[in-house]
Image (cartoon, grey):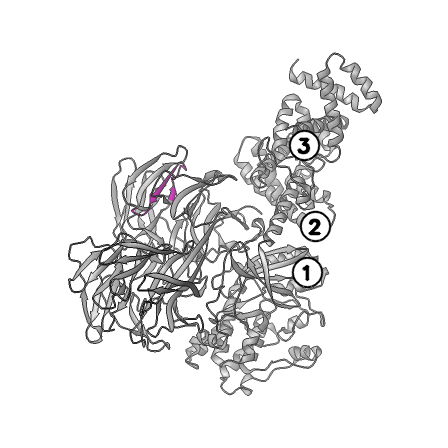
Amino acid sequence: MTSRQRYHLIAEIYHRAVELGADEQGTFLERACAEDPGLRREVEELISADSQASTGFMETSALDLVARRLAAKNLQFQQRSFGHYRLLSPLGSGGMGEVFLAEDLKLGRKVAVKMLPEHFSQDPERLRRFELESKAASALNDPRIITIHEIGWEDGRPFIVTEFVEGDTLRKVMKKGAPLHVAVGVIQQIANALSAAHLHGIVHRDLKPENIMVRPDGLIKVLDFGLAKLGERDGAESGPQNEHFKTEPGKVVGTIHYMSPEQALGKPVDHRTDIFSLGVILYEFACGRRPFHSDSDAGIYDSILNRTPLPPSKFRRDIPPQLDRVIEKALAKDPRQRYQKISQLRDDLDALHEMHLWSRLRRSAANLASTVLRKPLPAAALAVVLLSAAAFVHLTQRQQFNPALFSATDLAFTPLTTQSGEKRYPILLPDDRGLLYAAESDGRWNIYLKTGGGDPKNLTESLDAGADQPALSPEGNLIAFSSPPTGALQIVDVASGSIRRLSDSGFNPAWSPDGSEIAYAKGYFGQPGTRAVYPSSLWAMELASGRRRLITRLDAVQPHWSPDGRRIAYWGLHKGGRRDIWTIAADGSGEPVAVTDDPAINWNPVWSPNGEFLYFLSDRSGSMNLWRVPIDARTGETLGPPESATLPTAAGAYFSFSQDGRRLVYVHETKRTGLYAFDFDAERHEIRGGPRRIVGGSAVITNPDLSPDQQWFVFDAIGAPQEGLSLVRRDGSQFRKLTDDSFKDRAPRWHPEGDRILFFSDRSGRYELWTIRPDGSGLEQISATEGPAAQVSNWSPDGSRIAVSRQSGPPLLLSGDRLKRIQTLRPDGNMDFPPTFLIWSWSPDGKRLAGYGEGIVLYDFEKEAYQRQTYEGIRPVWLPDNRWLLFFQEDRLRMLDSATGSVRDLLSTAPMEFQSLGISRDGRTVFATLFSTESEVWMASAGLK
Amino acid sequence: MANATSREITGLLKAWSGGDESALERLTPLIYGELHRLAHYYMGRERDGLTLQTSALINEAYMKLVEVREVQWQDRAHFLGVAARLMRRILVDFARTRLAEKRGGDRQRVSLDAVPAVSQDSGPDMLALDRALQALEELDQRQSQVVELRFFGGMTIDETAAVLQVSPGTVRRDWRMARAWLYRELAGA
C-alpha cells in the first residue's frame, strides 16, 4: 500500500468515526482496524487533533493572522521603545499635555517627552494624520523646526519624543524685552522655518510665543507643528476629507490672542493663518503690546475680527514706517489681502536690512544670545535620529526620492545593527542576503557580514592590520577593501574567505560596473572634515593584468563609478580647503566637471543605479544629510541644482544603494565631544586630577587654547550649525561665540599678550591666517600666502613670529615688520619629509617646533633641521622644561623625551578618544577635547506601504 | 480600489500563472500594503481595547486583491487557484522575512501573556504550515487545495466547492480532516 492509499484508508475510517458518538466510535474503530493497531492509533490521533483544532486552529485566514502578528510585533516594539526613556523632570504642562525632560537610555542623550491628554487618542485616524504631519515637518530637517524622534503610546496615552532644546520660550524672551533688530531677526528665523514647511504643504495653525524656543546661541526652534489640529475635540469632523480647523469659542485650548480671523470664525484655514499669527507676534515683540486685547475672550474675538490695531510706531519711536507696513499687511483681516506667502513677508524684512535701517540687524542672532540665559553649549545642538517603530515612519514628500528608484511614495526606516562601536561603509548584498560594513572593535577596523539574526561575521579576522572601506563587486561575490594604515588594497572572496593582495597602497576602492577594474585613491581620509593627506591622486587597476593607470593628479578621494562605466565621481579639496564633488571621464581624458561648488562640506558621491542622479552627503542645510543632483552621466554636466533627499538623521554618513535601487543604507552617527581639563605635575610627570568637563555636547569642539592669564579657553566648534570660534571661562561659565557666520574658523591660538587670537579661516576664499580680539572686534587677515593653503599656526613665545603649517609641504615662518617676511622651513634631506606636516606647538624657549606627520617630528631653528621622534601619535605639546612633550594616540595620552626619543604612557581615556591637546604655560593644567562616537546602520526601503 | 487596478492585478495574476515570475514582484507590494493597513487597524483597536470585528475588513482586503466577483473569467476556478497559491507564497515569505518566523522545526511559540492580545491567534507557524502542506499534497492533493483556497485564499466553503467542482459537504469533510492532520503534524514537529 502506498502512503497515498494508506492516507485514503485513514480518511475513510476517520470520516465515519467522527460522525459517531464517543461510545460507538470505540466499537467502530475496533472493528475497522482490527488487523492494524497502527492504523487505529493514527485515526485516534487525528480525532484527538480534530477536537483541539476545532477551538480556533486556522479559523482566521492567513492574511488576517499575518496582519495580527505584524500588529503585535509593532506594538511590542513601541512598548519596548518607550522603555528606554527615563523621565527626569517636568519641563512644563498645559492644555496640550505635560512635557518632561527625559533621558534616552539607548543613545545616552536628553530628550523632551510630551505626554498628550488621553482624549487625544480617541481618534486614531486624526492622530495618524498628526503623526504624518509632524513627522513631515520634522523631516524637512530645517534646523529651526524641532526634530521629532518618536510618536508612540504609553498606557493608552500618545506621547511625542523630540529633541531637547535648551533655552527659553519666546514668551520669556519677549518679557525681558529686546532691541528692535533682535525682534526682527527672530521673526525672520521663524518666517524661514515656516517657509520651508509651507512649501511642503504643512501649516502650523497654532503659532504663538509659547511654541517657539530660543536657544542660548540665538537659534530659534518652532515646536508643535500640526498639534493644534489634533487638539480639536470635534470627533465628527475627523474624516480625511476635512482639512478645516473648527474652532468654537470657549473650546479652545490655550491662548486665543494669536488666532487669525478665519480661525476665530471656524472657517477653513490655510498657510495664511500662520502669516497672521506671525504678524501678531511681530507686533507684540516690536512694541511690547498685543494688537488685539480685551478683558474677555469675546472682546478679543471682536478685536481680531473687527478692529484695526494702531501702528506699532505709535508706541515705539524707533520703529520705521516700513515695519508698520509689514505688520499691517500681515494682519489684514481678509486672507486675500495679506501676504500670500510667508517668504514675501520675510523678503520685506530682508529689504529693511538692505536699506541699512539697522546696521546691526544681521548680527541679530548673536545679539539675541546675550538676552537669553547663558549656558554651556546647547546639548541639543545637533538633532539626532528618529527612533520610531520602523514600519510607521513615513516621509510624505513624494518628490524626495527618484520615482524610478523608489516606486512607492512611502519609505520605511529600519535599524540594521545594534552592537556598539563605530561603523562605516554599509553595503547591502543583492537579494537581501546580508549587510556588509566596516566596524571598529578594540581599536581595529574589520569588515563584517551580517546575515539573518545571527552575530555579524568578521570576514577579515585573519589580517593583523584589519580592514576598512569595503566595496562589493558587481557580481556580489568579491569585496575589495583597504587595510590601514598603509592602505594595502586587497580582495576577499565572500564565499570562500580567501584573500588576495592587489597593491601596497590604495584607499576607497570602487569597482567598474563590468568588474574588470578597481579605481582607488592614493590618500586616506577618515572624516570629511579632517584630511590627513593632500593631494591624493586617483588611479585605476585592471584586475586581470594588475596594470595601473593614473586618472587624475588633482586631489581626489572616495571614487564611485557611474553605472554605464563612463565617468567616476569623487570629492576633493580645492580653493584652499573647500570640499567639492567632481566627475571625470573614467579613461582619464578631459577635465573634471564640477558637481558642487560651494562652501558646504560635500562628500560621499554615489551614482543612482539608473545613472540619472548623483547622490551625495552635504552639510549645506546645517547638518549632514543626503542630497542629489540630476546629472548627465555621459558628460558629467549637472542638469539642475542640488535637491534635498532628506533622511531622518541630522548626522548621516557613508551611504550606498542596493543594486536594484530600492533600498539605501546609511550610517547614523552620534558624536559627543567635550573640553576637559586635567591637573598636571610637570616635574613628576603625573596627572594629578581630572578630567573635569568644562563644556560639551553634540557639537564638535576642538582645538582649544588657554589664554595667557589662564582664565579663558578659545576653541572652534563645528555643527551648531556653523563652524566658528567660541570662548568659555575655565570654570565652564560665560560661554559665547566669537565668530558666527558661514566661514570656517579653525585652530585659534592666543597671542602671548592675550590681546589677540590667531586662527586660520576660509573667509578670503582660501585658508589664510586671521586675528581677532577677544571682544570680537578687530577681525583682520594677516597672511597672503601662495601654494598650499595655511593650516594650524603658532605664535612664537615672544609673539613676534608665526610658524604656519600648510595643507602640504614644509611650513612657513612669518616674521619681521607686520609679519611680512615669509620664509620656508625647508627639510634638509636627512629625513623623509611627510606629505602633510602640521605644527602644533612652539617650545617655550623659542628654539624648536613640535609637529606631526606620520608621527611626531621636531624642527630645530639653530640646526635648521627636522628630526623625527616617533612614527605614531599626533598634536605634541611642549612642557615648560623644553625637553619633554605630551602627545596622544586615540585614547592614550603619552610622553616623549626629546633628548632620548623614549616614549611612555600617561593615561587612557577609553572609550573616549583624544581629539586635541594643549597645556597651560605654567605646565599645571593639561586640557584636551575628548570625543566618543556611536553609530548605527539604518536602511531606508521603498514599497512597504 | 479602482477598476483599472483590479484589471491590472488580474493581468498580473494571469502572467504569473503563465510562468512570468516578474509579475510576482509587482503583486507583492500590493499585498504587503494591505497587510500593513490591516495591522495598523489592529494596533488602533488594541490600544483602544476594542474587540475585533474584522471579518468585513478581511473580506474587503481579499476583494481588493482578487477582484474576481467583477471579472468575467473563462476559467474562474483556475484563476482562484492561482490567486490562493500566490497569497500562500507571499504570506509565507512575509512571515519569514518580516516577522522573522523561522524555517522548519525550531518554530517560535509566542507566549500569550508576554505579548499584546492581538497575537492570541492560536494560528500556526506559517513556515511550518507551508511545509506540512507540501507533505499533505503528496498524500491528498484535493485536501491540500482546500486548505490553500480556504486558509490562504480566504474563500468560503461554498466558493471552495465551486472552484473544485465538488459538493460543499466534500469540502467540509476535506477541510476537517486536513485541519486535524495539519494540527497533528505541527504539534508533533
The answer to whether marks 3 and 2 mark residues whose Cβ atoms lie closer than 8 Å is: no
Seen at 54% across and 54% down, the residue is: A387
Q: Position of residue A116 (x, y in %)?
A: 65, 62
Instruction: Evaluate whether label 3 is on the same chain as label 1.
Output: no
Q: Position of residue A799 (x, y in %)?
A: 25, 73
Residue density around tag 1, few if under 14, some if 14–19, many if 20 or more, within 10 Å? some
Relative height, residue A496 to residue A252 (above, below): above
Extent of the magenta region: A470-486
The residue that disc 2 covers is B45
Discs 3/2, front: 2
The residue that disc 3 covers is B149
**Label 2 secondary element:** helix
Residue density around tag 3, few if under 14, some if 14–19, many if 20 or more, within 10 Å? many
Q: Upstream in the sequence, badge 3 or badge 2?
A: 2
The numbered disc on residue A120 is 1
Position of the N terminus of chain A by quadrant: top right
